[in-house]
Amino acid sequence: MFRLLKKITAVAFILVLSWQMLPAQKQKTFSAEGIQANKPKLVVGIVVDQMRYDYLFRYWSKYSETGFKKLVGEGFLLKNANYNYVPTYTGPGHACIYTGTTPAMNGIVSNEWYDRELKKDVYCVEDTTMHPLGTYSMSSRVSPNRLLTTTITDELRLSNNFQSKVIGVALKDRGAILPAGHTANAAYWFDKETAHWATSSFYMNELPNWVEEFNAKKMAAELMKEKWNTLLPIDQYVESTADDVRYEGLYAGETHPVFPHDLPAISLKDKDLIKRIPMGNTFTKDFAEAALKGEEMGKGSATDFLAVSFSSTDYVGHQFGINSIEVEDTYLRLDRDLSEFFEFLEKWVGHSNYLLFLTADHGAAGNVTFNTDEKIPSGFFDAKQVDSLLENYLQSVYGPGEFVSELTSHGIYLNQPLLEQKKIGLGDMEEKCAEFFSRMKGVAAAITAQQLKTGNYTEGLLSFIQKGFNGKRSPDVILSLDPSWMEWESKSGTTHGAAYSYDTHVPLLFYGWNIPHGQSSDPVSVTDVAPTVASLLNIEFPSGTTGKPVSALMNFYSK
C-alpha cells in the first residue's frame, strides 16, 4: 500500500509540474510581457481601395503563391469584417481604419461635405493655410486638420516621445494623409500636374533628397510606355464578363472598352492616367519601398509605421465595374506587386520583425444596367431631378425661397439662415423633407438630424446612419437608398457608399510578427483594426476609439 501511494504521489507531482510549465512555455510566445519586450521593427498598414471581400477568392486560382495566398496561408484572416456606418467612401474608410471609430466621432463624414459656415463644399483634407511641396498645384494645400481624433499612427509616435517614424503613401492625397495622422513625419501623394510625388508644408519645408531622386526617374511615364494588355491569355478570364460590354466606361479617345488599352496615346489626353491603370499600384509599391529605404524605416530602436494605400483598384473599378476583365487583371497584377513588396520586406527587416495588416476602405456595387439585365432589383437615383422637385415642394408649403443648400444621394443641407429669416422651424422642415423622400421610389430610409441627435439606434440601417452622422458636418436629412440603387451619374462602371454588404464587407488580414496562422468567421468591425494593433504594440488606443481588439486573434495571446 505504501509503495502504491508513493507512485501515485510521484505521478501527481509530475502532472502538477507539467501543468505549471505549460503556460510558461506559451507565455514565451504570446504573453503581453513577451510582446512588450520584443516589438516589431516595422508596422505596415495596407489599404486596397474598393476591394470587395469576394475579390480575395474570386480570382484565387490565378493568384501567385507569394501574394494574397501568402497572407491567407500564413496569416490570420477575418472572414466577416464589415464597416458599420454610411457613407462608405474613401475618406471615411481610411479614417475609420486608423482612428478605430466612425464618422460620428472622427468627423470625416464623406470625401466632401457642405460647410455651413463657409457656405460651400469642403474637401476632407483641404487646408488653405498650407502650401504645396513638389508641385505648384494648389490642390496640394492639404493636411489632416479636419480629422477630429488621433490615429493609431499618432498613438505610436506619442508612445515613445516621437521616436517612431510614420509615413503615409497613396496616389490619393486623402489615402496618404488620413492614415498618417496628425503627427506623421510625412505623407506623399501623386500630383498629376508634375507627375511627381508631392506633399504639403504641413509636414516639411522641402522634399527630402530621396523623393527628388525618385521623381527625377519619371517612372510614371515609363510605366505607361506600352499598351495595357491582359497578364494572361484573355480567354482565361472566365470569372469576368466579356471584354466589350455596355456596362463599362471608356478612357479618353477610346470608342470601345477593350484590350489592349493604348496607354501611350491615352496619356497624351489624360494627365491622371497612371491612377486609373494597374500600373499605378506598381508605381505606389516602388515609392513605398523607396520611402522605407530613404528614411531607414525599421532600422532604428523604435517601431516605425508605413501606411500604404493602393488607389488604382478604385479608379479601375469605378470605370469598368466589378465584373470586368479590367478589374480582374488589375487584381492579378496587384497580387504580383504585393508579392514583390513582401519579398522586399523580408529582406529589409525580416519576417519576424514586421507586423502587417491588409484591408479595404469600402467595397463596390454591381452595375445597375447589368443587374437589370440579370433581373436583379436595382435602379438609378437622379439627385438633380430630385433637387428640383424638392424645391418646388418646399416652396408650395413655405412660399418663395431657395431652401436647399446642397443635395446628394446621401442627404440634404437646408438653407438654415433663410429658415431663421423666415421664422421657419428647422425641425419642421426636416420632417417635411423626410416625408417627401420617404415616398420616393428607391429610398430605403429618410431620417432627420433631430432624430439622430435624440434617438439611439443600436441595430439595422438606422444604426449605420447614426454612426456616420456628425451634427456639425452631416446633412439635415439623411437618405439611404434601396439595395443596388445608385446615383444617376453611375451609368457605367460602379460606385459605392451604401450600408449593404457589397459596400461594407471587406477583407481583413493580419500577418507577420507574432501573428498566428488561422481564420475566423466571427463578426468584426473595421473599427477594430486600430485597437487590435494598439493591443499588439501595447500602446494607447486612438482618442475616439469605439472599436475593440479582435478577440478571435487576441485570444491566442491569453492561452
Image: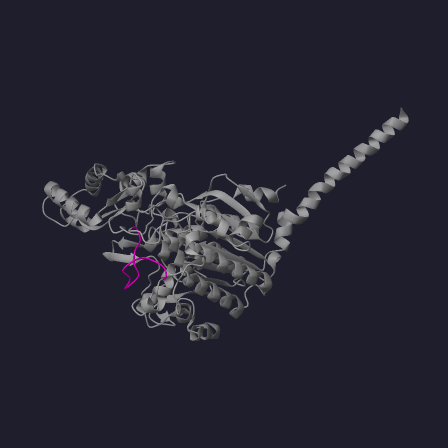
Residue 436 drawn at (x, y percent): 19, 39
Relative to 182, 370 lies left or right: left
Q: Position of residue 206 (x, y in %)?
A: 42, 74
Q: Main secondary structure of the magenta part?
A: loop
Q: Which residues are magenta?
A: 247-260
| Frontmost residue, 302 versus 42 | 42
Q: Quadrant of residue 40?
A: bottom right
Q: Residue at x 63, y 55 (%)?
A: 38
Using the rendered image of the protein, determine whether residue 276 is visible from the camera's viewpoint: yes
Q: Is residue 252 magenta?
A: yes
Q: Is residue 339 magenta?
A: no
Horizontal and vertical percent for residue 254? 29, 62
Count of labels shown?
0
Is residue 158 at all visible to an observer of this figure?
no
Residue occupying the point 44% across, 65% down: 283
Q: Which quadrant would the N terminus be assigned to in this image?
A: top right
Query: Does 241 sit left or right of 8 as displayed?
Result: left
Above or below, comparing residue 365 to residue 258 in the picture: above
